[in-house]
Image (spheres, rainbow, N blue to C red):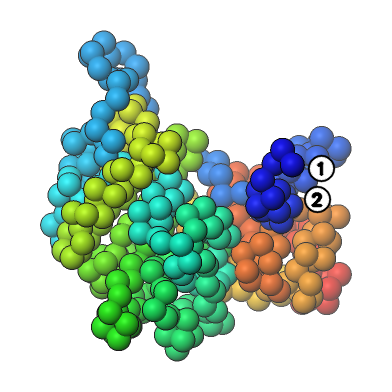
Amino acid sequence: MFMSEKVRKNMETGSWIRKMFDEGNTMKKRYGADKVFDLTLGNPIVEPPEQFFVELKKLANSTTPGLHRYMENAGYLETRAAVATQLSKETGLSPGAGDIVMTVGAAGAINVVLKTILNAGEEVILFTPCFFEYLNYIDNHGGVYKFAATDEQFQPKLDVLEKAINPKTKAIIVNSPHNPTGVVYSADMMRQIGELLRKKEAQYGTQIYIISDEPYRKLIYDGLKYPSPLLFHPRAIIATSHSKDLALPGERIGYIAIHPQCPEKQELMDGFIYCNRILGFVNAPAMMQHIVRYLQDVTVSIADYQKKRDFLYANLVEMGYSLVKPQGAFYMFPKSPIPDDVAFVRALQEELVLAVPGVGFGGPGHFRISYCIDDRTLAGSLDGLRRAAKKFGLK
């Protein structure tokens, strides 16, 4: 067999997000792109902030030697120091450049962390629903994923989490603001999670890490503040990117940040740097490292995203859909009007509206829609969503 059985099997199950995206492209060719309303991908339509282009032009016109050469596998010292300074402002902690590794996006960061910490058969707990690529990342490095259900508001259930933890538990992945629901975990929730992990570490004599996937950290609404997991557990590790807050998903620039008081910090940092190299990333893109060094306190317009959220949420509620109002990110996760969320998403396709079934996130009975799109597409999707709501007996 010319292809590995594991890869073949994983390709067959595939990503529902990509599957719907591909089907959407087929529909756009058939009906015309202007007649199909695609709410599938978290691929921001907004352009990067003006400061990005200022720095990009400086680099494009620079003749400084060495701009495009290799650097330390951890990344440029000046960029890591800038990241550490911003994290210090946000958390009140004192991370340094030595606590940061620049990576090829958040996906690269998560894979580097998992490669570093996992022994074969060790478990990583995921709160469902979740971004399902986590399953592949864990499998990549010999780990085993374990699901922990959340409540009706998509908040972790501490009793469920406690039952899921055992001597094989190596980490939990936290994603807040959350994909696909848009919820934000409160400071009190993160405090309780940290306390529970330390209790279980003492019980089993193990180390349990929080891997915090934070690409939406700055996309928070209604004046809410982000409670960093770094404040609640010494074995917290940030894995993030600037794909969303600077609208740079195609540039693949992110970083790992470890708690400055993590007991195993130096050994883990050495492992992250080593794994960044041997996984084939080698180092994060040089030009993007130079640019984001100056953009750590810059972000796209939060007000514009909140306006889109308010517009879509108000209309969905008026149509009769039931959903938790997102507090961040740019997704909504309404309940499907029928138990079969795949069938409902197919019904939406008949209305030329593209969404992703909740089963693709371990959240059956729901569907995900993304609102990081242009206003024409957002407004144009409403008629199809309304017709589908009426077809299945909503308000």
Of marks 2 and 1, the one in the foreground: 1
User: 66 or 35: nearer the eye?
Assistant: 66
**Quadrant of the image for the C terminus?**
bottom right
Q: Residues within 10 Å of mark 1 (few under 14, many from 20)?
A: many
Instruction: Determine if residue 283 is in view.
Output: yes
As measured in the structure, the alpha-carbon distance from the residue carrying label 2 to the one carrying label 1 is 8 Å
**Residue with the mark numbered 1:** 27
Q: Is residue 129 left or right of residue 185?
A: right
Quadrant in the picture for residue 339: bottom right
Residue 392 point in image, percent of width and height: 84, 73
| Residue type (three-letter) at the residue carrying disc 1 | Met
Residue that appears at 57% across and 70% down: 129
Residue 3 point in image, percent of width and height: 69, 41
**Residue with the mark numbered 2:** 352
| Residue type (three-letter) at the residue carrying disc 2 | Leu
Residue that appears at 17% across and 47% down: 98
Residue 310 point in image, percent of width and height: 54, 62
